[in-house]
Image (spheres, rainbow, N blue to C red):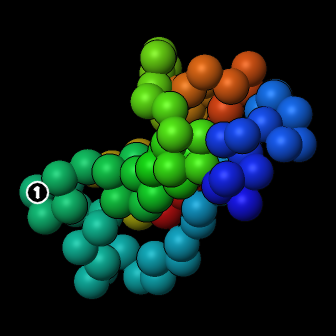
Amino acid sequence: MIQMIRSKELGTVKAIQADNGQNQGSPLNQWRLKRALAGGGSLPDVGIYCLNATRYLTGEEPIAISAQIFSTPGDPRFKEVEESVTLPRSSNAEVNTCRPQL
């Protein structure tokens, strides 16, 4: 698959969408939801896998990254870290969406 993508055997990459979600369970004992222990939220925890998969498949490094974060209002699990991050464009592909979610 990697060779097919990099050689453009199937044409130029127009879009890549990578999603990674995890059910974190109870907020009372989940280290990922505590900023001091986790160091961040969904992007550094699970989102890096989406971003690295895109880099690996295309053989390209990001040219620009922007992000939007979201947390469900009133959800106590996401008091310290964000629930999800969307990276609308993170490589040379026209559209590259990465949506990690805790």
Q: Nearer the viewer, residue 35 or 53?
A: 53
Residue at the top extreme? Answer: 64
Q: Residue at x 63, y 26 (%)?
A: 88
* Residue furthest right as drawn: 10
Rendering coords of residue 36 (x, y %)? 11, 57
Of 66 and 93, the residue lying toward us: 93
The image quadrant that residue 97 belongs to is top right
Location of residue 16 by image quarter: top right
The percent position of residue 50, horizontal first and vertical second, equals 53, 52
Q: Residue at point 60% right, 40% down?
A: 58
Q: Is residue 40 visible?
A: yes
Q: Secondary structure at mark 1?
A: helix
Q: Is residue 12 above or below residue 45?
A: above
Of 38 and 64, which appears nearest the observer? 64
Which residue is found at the position 59% from the left and 65% from the top? 21
Extreme residue in the left direction: 36
Q: In terms of depth relative to the viewer, which is nearer, 12 or 76?
A: 12
The answer to whether residue 67 shows anywhere in this view is no
**Horizontal and vertical percent for residue 20?**
59, 62
Q: Residues within 10 Å of mark 1 (few under 14, many from 20)?
A: few
Which amino acid type is shown beneath numbered disc 1? Ala
Q: Residue at x 47, y 82 (%)?
A: 25
Q: How many marks?
A: 1
Judge left or right: residue 44 versus residue 48: left
Q: Is residue 53 left or right of residue 94?
A: left
Q: Which residue is mark 1?
A: 36
Residue 2, relative to residue 63: is it above or below? below
